[in-house]
Amino acid sequence: MSRLKASLDSLVARLSPCLIPLKKRRLILCYHRLADIAAQHSNPFYNVTLTTPIKNFEQQIRWLSSFCRFTTLDQLHQPNNSQQWQVAITFDDGYRDNLTLGLPILEQYQVPITLFSATAYTEDPELIPWWDICNYLMNVPTTPALQQALTTLSTGLDFPTSVHSDLHIRLSLALQKLNTQGPQHKAQALNQQLLAALNNTGATLNNDMLSCAELQAFAASPWVDIGAHTHTHPNMALLTGAQQQSELVASLNCLKQWGITPSAWFAYPFGKRRNYTDETLSLLSSLGLKGALTTDSGYITAQSNAYRLPRFSIDGRWSLPSFKARLLAGPFLKSLQKAA
């Protein structure tokens, strides 16, 4: 399958000069993290899928700039007769590298972006997102103290040990399952216990999110809008209506308290249909937000629901040919691969 995928990507990339003029597309890209080569090997929170090498990012933006018009989300959602492809760039979560590595490239190519901030992690640098705890477990070498702490913690987990023999992987899977499927109180408890276990082994952990001052500096750029991504990045479908509203209001209020005017757009944490409810859409509308972004791949059309706009999630492992293929013929390639 991987060889077929690579061959299809290469073919579509070579045909890109012919494919681009066939239909003028409108689309949104979703990035998470950026990294230089050194950071890829030294950052304990590194995740290969969610982290785009900065060299690749620059190549992607340069290629897009050769034929498309970069737009804001407001501009993209308004029907128009543009004779160019229109692309909106977004970043989810609010990582520091979006500012330190991304902003110079965005300014060079004059690319407007919207960054969606999970504000709790900017508010408290010692709060580590559960997925970064997973990354830490997978990246950091085991010490006797860490192994003992994790062994003690794992004995109370209601999770089959037969899933994998490696303790780090078992705990990462348990953490992922609880945070994405619930129950929420058990997920929060395990997050806190794992973080405490890591800190008790001598590690002093701070998250990689933008600080309040950094977020303010980012927002000061004429190329950057900041939007809400909830406060703690939960799976909204697991929350009651009141809890969902609390997450949305807390995120919006944090941005306002920091002197940042929130974007009129929202990005769902995780972004799949199973991660939000119809009530979520109603709450967003009642709060005056224009729409919301998913992580379902697809193009923006006249029929697109403003509160379920698709985005192409960028995989950090993609080569430039793969990037071109996903944007030019992503839905078609996906159907071919399923058929195969």
Image (tube, rainbow, N blue to C red):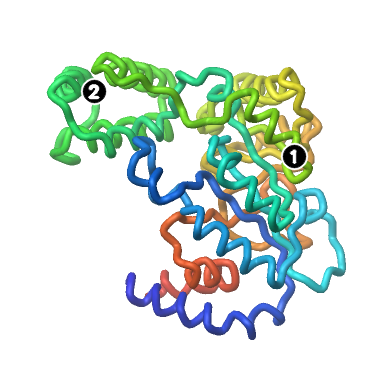
Mark 1 packing: few (<14 Cα in 10 Å), some, or many (20+)?
few
Q: Is residue 169 left or right of residue 20?
A: left
Question: In the rendered image, is residue 240 in sight?
Answer: no
- Looking at the image, is 316 positioned above or below residue 189? below
Residue at x-position 24% and y-position 23%: 157
**Can you give x and y, in whole percent of width and height, for residue 101 in the image?**
56, 45
Of callouts 1 and 2, the N-terminal one = 2
In the displayed structure image, the side of residue 210 where residue 89 appears, left or right: right
Residue 182 falls in image quadrant: top left
Q: Which one is nearer the viewer's eye here, 104 or 13?
A: 104
Say which amino acid is labelled 1: Ser
9 relative to 285, above or below: below
Q: From this view, report whether residue 189 is shown above or below residue 109.
A: above
Image point (45%, 55%), residue name: 316
Estimate the x, y position of residue 281 in percent, counting from the top left: 69, 37
Q: State which quadrant residue 86 falls in.
A: bottom right
* Res 47 quadrant in image: top left
Viewer-side residue, 282 vs 154: 154
* Secondary structure found at label 2: loop
For the N terminus, the quadrant is bottom left
Badge 2 is on which residue?
157
Left or right placement of residue 101 versus residue 174 in this view:
right
Q: Position of residue 76 (x, y in %)?
A: 78, 56
Quadrant where the C terminus is found in the figure: bottom left
Is residue 222 shown left or right of residue 177?
right
Q: Amino acid at mark 2?
A: Leu
What residue is shown with label 1? Answer: 221
Name the residue rendered at 84%, 69% in the picture. Answer: 82
Q: Nearer the viewer, mark 1 or mark 2?
A: 1
Name the spot of residue 220 as percent of width and height, x first: 75, 34
